[in-house]
Image (tube, rainbow, N blue to C red):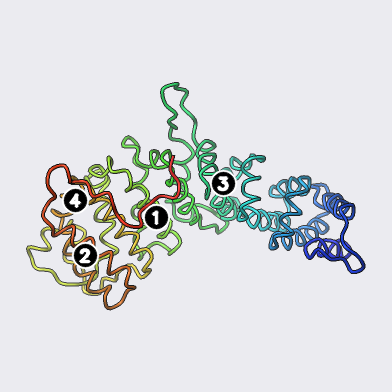
């Protein structure tokens, strides 16, 4: 479709080979483009048109054009379900790009109900586009409104005038399939579910769901902190999700107790193959005792500092702090501190030092036990 490519290019660049693009010409391009994006149009024409649209979504002027003409936007969304894979592939590329733009993101959330269909796509083991659906949801849940809309769509709201809790349903299913090896039969990894969880746990409602004592979803996520068995994207998403959940201090004793056992999962990636005395080993959680000499630490420095920040949050109140002190946490962090000084960024060493100082210090006077003033620890979203 060369003539349409020329017109679209003119819109993006705001220039025409012979004259400025008028509003009438722009409107005509939009109308003609919609014709090519109809489900009933021949696949080769839809593909050619979509390739142009994908190009538009890489440019601010192009995005503004698509947002201005809702018929184009709606036609694009409809092609996410096209039966021809090359058509739907290009439609997903365009929508991923659009949902990364703040203006388009707001419009999608306000005007279009696509979250339910995206969840269904992710939960379908035969879907070719589960990862793409995850990426769109990851973009949509970056805002508070998007995160709460997502929770409403994947949870059944309890009809109770006294609260606005959510029951356990689709979110649990998403976590279940995230935890299954090769759930998707078409090659999607579903790793971006971890980043979606990071986004939704920046809200009170999201954390409440993961920290439900009756159905502790957070416990299913802890094994994905292991660098030996989890890819980097998963580890980053889950480490941030866990850190977000550690802001709710009323759950610290439960998280650190036997039912969840969060401490050993946070410490294991930070531990190396250093040799401890028999007394020191005996004070550690069982899975951290007598580690082999070739034990490797988490290689990603950004994840290590997230784990350190989670430990700082857990020891910010007295019950959590006493559990960390009595579980040999100091010995792991002492060795990590020395290792970070030699191998890691300065910030990591500083965070180790903060944690060490808390672990070796005498307990504060009565009434001063809560140490909630931790630098750089503030949620972007909260409700």
Q: Residue 275 placed where, x, y %?
A: 15, 72
Residue furthest bottom as drawn: 342
Pair 3/1: label in front: 1
The percent position of residue 42, horizontal first and vertical second, equals 84, 53
The numbered mark, 3 or 1, whose residue comes first in the sequence reads 3
Q: From the viewer's perspective, is the residue at label 4 or at label 1 nearer?
A: 4
Q: Quadrant of the C terminus?
A: top left
Q: Earlier in the sequence, mark 4 or mark 2?
A: 4
Q: Which residue bears the numbered disc 4? A: 321
Number of marks: 4
Task: Answer left or right for 207 relative to 53.
Answer: left
Name the mark on residue 124: 3
Name the residue: 54% across, 39% down.
149
Callout 1: few (<14), some (14-19), or many (20+) C-alpha neighbours within 10 Å?
many
Give the residue drawn at x 81%, y 59%.
Answer: 44
Q: Quadrant of residue 366?
A: top left
Q: Which residue is identified by label 1? A: 240
Q: Secondary structure at mark 1?
A: helix
The answer to which of 197 and 355 lies nearer the viewer is 355
Q: CA distance from mark 4 to mark 1?
A: 21 Å
Q: Nearer the viewer, mark 4 or mark 3?
A: 4
Classify 215 as above or below 321. Answer: above
Q: In front here: 126 or 379?
A: 379
Which numbered disc, 4 or 1, marks the residue that appears first in the sequence?
1
* x and y, in percent, of residue 358 in the image: 18, 57
Of the image marks 4 and 3, the number of the one nearer the N terminus: 3
The reply to whether discs 4 and 3 touch (Cβ–Cβ < 8 Å) is no
The residue pinned by badge 2 equals 333
Q: Is 89 left or right of 176, judged from the image as shown?
A: right
Q: Earlier in the sequence, mark 3 or mark 2?
A: 3
Q: Position of residue 61 (x, y in %)?
A: 73, 59
């Amino acid at each position: 479709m060369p003539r349409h490519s020329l017109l679209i290019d003119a819109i993006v660049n705001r220039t025409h080979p012979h004259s400025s693009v008028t509003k009438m010409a722009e409107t005509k391009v939009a109308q003609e483009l919609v014709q090519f994006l109809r489900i009933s149009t021949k696949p080769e024409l839809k593909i050619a048109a979509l390739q142009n649209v994908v190009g538009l979504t890489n440019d601010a002027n192009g995005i503004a054009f698509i947002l201005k003409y809702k018929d184009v936007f709606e036609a694009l969304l409809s092609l996410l379900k096209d039966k021809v894979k090359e058509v739907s592939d290009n439609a997903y590329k365009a929508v991923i790009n659009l949902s990364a733009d703040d203006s388009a993101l707001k419009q999608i959330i306000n005007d279009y109900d696509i979250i339910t269909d995206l969840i269904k796509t992710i939960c379908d083991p035969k879907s070719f586009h589960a990862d793409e659906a995850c990426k769109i949801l990851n973009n949509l849940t970056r805002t508070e409104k998007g995160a709460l809309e997502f929770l409403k769509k994947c949870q059944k709201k309890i009809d109770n005038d006294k609260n606005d809790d959510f029951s356990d349903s689709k979110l649990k299913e998403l976590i279940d399939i995230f935890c299954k090896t090769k759930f998707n039969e078409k090659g999607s990894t579903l790793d971006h579910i971890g980043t979606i969880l990071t986004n939704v746990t920046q809200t009170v409602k999201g954390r409440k769901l993961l920290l439900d004592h009756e159905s502790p979803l957070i416990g299913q996520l802890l094994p994905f902190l292991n660098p030996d068995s989890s890819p980097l994207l998963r580890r980053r998403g889950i480490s941030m999700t866990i850190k977000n959940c550690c802001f709710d201090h009323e759950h610290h004793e439960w998280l650190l107790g036997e039912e969840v056992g969060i401490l050993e999962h946070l410490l294991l990636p930070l531990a190396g193959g250093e040799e401890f005395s028999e007394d020191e080993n005996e004070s550690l959680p069982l899975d951290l005792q007598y580690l082999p000499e070739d034990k490797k630490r988490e290689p990603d420095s950004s994840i290590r500092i997230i784990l350190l920040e989670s430990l700082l949050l857990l020891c910010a109140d007295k019950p959590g702090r006493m559990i960390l002190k009595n579980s040999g946490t100091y010995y792991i962090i002492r060795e990590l501190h020395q290792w970070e000084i030699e191998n890691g960024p300065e910030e990591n060493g500083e965070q180790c030092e903060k944690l060490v100082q808390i672990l070796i210090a005498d307990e504060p006077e009565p009434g001063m036990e809560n140490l909630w003033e931790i630098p750089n620890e503030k949620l972007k979203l909260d409700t």
